[in-house]
Image: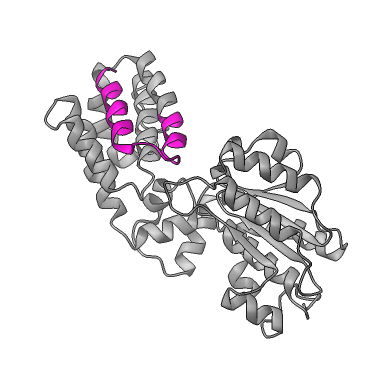
Amino acid sequence: MNACRDILPWHDTAWQLLRAYITHERIPQSILITGQAGLGKRKLVRFFAQLLLCETTCNDTFTPCGHCRSCTLFRSGTHPDFVEIKSESEDKDIGVDQIRGLLSQLRLTVQYQQYRVIVVYQAEKMNRSAANSFLKGLEEPPNRTAIILITDQLSLIPATIQSRCQKILIKTPSPECATDWLASNKVSGDLSLLLQLTNGAPLLAQEYAGSDAIAIREQLFNQFCLLRSKKVSIVEVAAFCCDHHQFDLLAWINSWIVDLVKISQTSANTSVRNIDLYDSLNILSGNLDLQKLYDLYVTTLELRVQLKQPINKNLAYEGFFIRWLAV
C-alpha cells in the first residue's frame, strides 16, 4: 500500500502524531479522531490500523508491507483482530447489543501477535445505553488493544468518553491546499464553488463533482426564495429536501442565512460567502426580521444534528420551513 495515496496532505499533523506513537511504542489504548466530514478520517484510520496489524512493517517508511498474512487478511476484510463497529443504516443508532458484542470480543485472546484494533465509525451515533456500555470497555481495555473512535461531531460524544481518549483533530485544509489536491486528482468543474458547498472538505468536493450537487443547490435556493412568496408549498420543499438528503442541505441553507444577516447589516458583498447568489440574497434580505433570522440560524444548527438521528425528516423539514416563513 502506498502511504502517499492514503496519507493526504492535510493529514500531516495527525499522521506525525500517530507515527510518534509507533516510534516510541506507546500506542494509546483509546484514540478519538475528529474533524468535519470529507477529510478522509476513515482513510487515515484504516491505514494506521493496517500498520499496527502488519507483521513486517517497514519502520523507515512507516508503511505496511502489503503481502504478509495480516495484510492479506486485512485487505480481504477478514482479519480476526480488526473489528469495525458502525450503525446498521443511516437512520439507526449504534445500539447497546453491538457494543456488548464488542466487549465480548475484547475478552478473547488476540489471534496474532501484533495488536487488536477496534474502530467505531460515526461514534456520535452510539445511543445512551451503548455509550455507557462502551465506557466500561474503555476503563479496562486489554493489553495491545487500540480502540479508535471516529466522529464528525465531537460535541455529541459524551464527556466521560472524551476524557478517556487521546483526541486528534483533522484540520480542514486551506483553500489553496484543497484546490491543488482537487486539481491534481483531475477533478473538473468550479472547484471554488465545490469547496464552498462542502465547507472546504476536498474528498466531499470530489464526490460532489461527480454528482448533481450544484444543480440541486440551485433548485433548493429557488424553492427557498419562492417559499417566501408562497409560490411553492412547505410540503413540496420539505419533500424535495428528503429526496436529496444525501447532500448537507442545511449547511447550504445555513450559509444563506449567514449571508442574509451580513447583507442586512451592510450592503457590501465583500464578506458574502455565496457571492454567486448575492443579487437574489440582497432582494430577499429586504423584508426580514433580523432577530428571527438569528434564531433561525440557531435552529439550523440544531436541526443538522437532529437529522443525523432516527427522526421523521419530513416533519422536521416542514417545521423548519414554517419558521423560515415567520422570519
**In this view, 308 is above or below 62:** above
The residue lying furthest to the left in this view is 231
Q: Residue 234: percent from the left, percent from the top? A: 20, 30
**Residue 326 lies in the magenta stretch:** yes
Q: Is residue 8 visible?
A: no
**In this view, 70 is above or below 229:** below
Q: Residue 150: percent from the left, percent from the top? A: 61, 51
The residue at the point 69 percent across, 34 percent down is 159
The C terminus: image quadrant: top left
**In this view, 291 is above or below 32:** above
The residue at the point 70 percent across, 57 percent down is 104
The residue at the point 30 percent across, 33 percent down is 317
Q: Residue 190: percent from the left, percent from the top? A: 35, 56
Question: Nearest the camera: 25 or 40?
Answer: 25
Colouring chosen for the image of the structure = one colour
The residue lying furthest to the right in this view is 24
**Residue 271 lies in the magenta stretch:** no
The N terminus: image quadrant: bottom right
Question: Nearest the camera: 141 or 262?
Answer: 141
Task: Tell me which segment is drawn in magenta.
Answer: 300-327
Question: Nearest the camera: 221 or 23?
Answer: 23
Task: Name the chief secondary structure element in magenta.
Answer: helix
The residue at the point 24 percent across, 26 percent down is 284
Q: Residue 134, located in which quarter of the rendered image?
A: top right
Q: Residue 300: percent from the left, percent from the top? A: 40, 30
Question: Nearest the camera: 154 or 176?
Answer: 154
